[in-house]
Image (cartoon, rainbow, N blue to C red):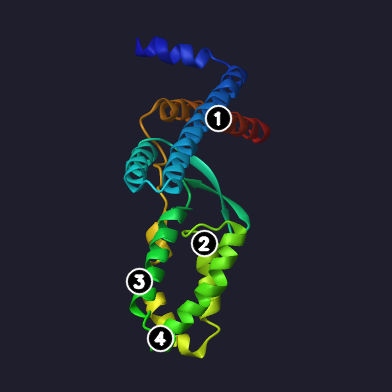
Amino acid sequence: MKKRGRTKIKKIKTWQLVLILIPLIAIDATLLRIDHIRMTELRGAVLSADEAENDEEVLNKLEELKKFVFSNIVINVVDDNGAQKITFGTGPFYLEHQYIRAANAALAEAEKNFAADNNPNGNVYAAASAVCQPLAIQNGWTWNNANFINCMMTEINKYPAANELQTDILASLPSTELYRKEYSSPLWAPTLTGFMILITILVVVVILIRLIIWIVLRIYLLFF
């Protein structure tokens, strides 16, 4: 049976293997795109839960995204300082709204600690609020809007007496890295996509071996 199998494979012409390779590549590309779209949907669900300020849902969706990425081949194109880079996985993404809520909590704590009328830093915070709160109302900024945080920090930095308050705020602000997420996928996984890629690679290897043998024989015939 093994001999018959090898005989049948030998009877397949190289041009026939090339014809087989074309639809295989198309199938691989389609399956990889399906996996990529699924990853994008799951990542979008995480960001939607973050925007809705549902931390429990964020954790659930992150776990679902992580399980999918760790068990599938996910090829992604990400922006790396203006250049497009191919990577396996989600690429970096940020839980922006969670960070904004944490940063606002730090601002609120700073206001609480330095709110005394006889404390010059407290006056600085009040002065900054007097400038930024009307802007927030005018522009429709919510309490957890990044523009409001930036406005407060800009106004606070205008005052020499704000050093202590600024130090306290910067020390309490969470690191952005805590809200940066990125999951990497394996180069190969035992999925339909993975097995189809293996078949494609096998066909490519057979074609290359036949081409190498053909080239070697041609060279041999030229000189011998």
- Residue for point 44% across, 81% down: 166
Q: Quadrant of the C terminus?
A: top right
Q: What's the mark number on residue 164? A: 4
Instruction: Say what amino acid the circle numbered 4 marks.
Output: Glu
**Can residue 16 be seen in the rendering of this structure?**
yes
Q: Is residue 7 above or below residue 162?
A: above
Q: Earlier in the sequence, mark 1 or mark 2?
A: 1
- Residue for point 57% across, 33% down: 212
Q: What's the mark number on residue 29? A: 1
Q: Earlier in the sequence, mark 4 or mark 2?
A: 2
Residue annotated with mark 3:
109
Q: Residue 157 versus residue 180: which sits nearer the camera?
A: 157
Residue 9 location (% of width, % of height): 48, 16
Of marks 3 and 2, the one in the foreground: 3
Residue 85 location (% of width, % of height): 57, 51
Q: Earlier in the sequence, mark 1 or mark 4?
A: 1
Determine the secondary structure under disc 4.
helix
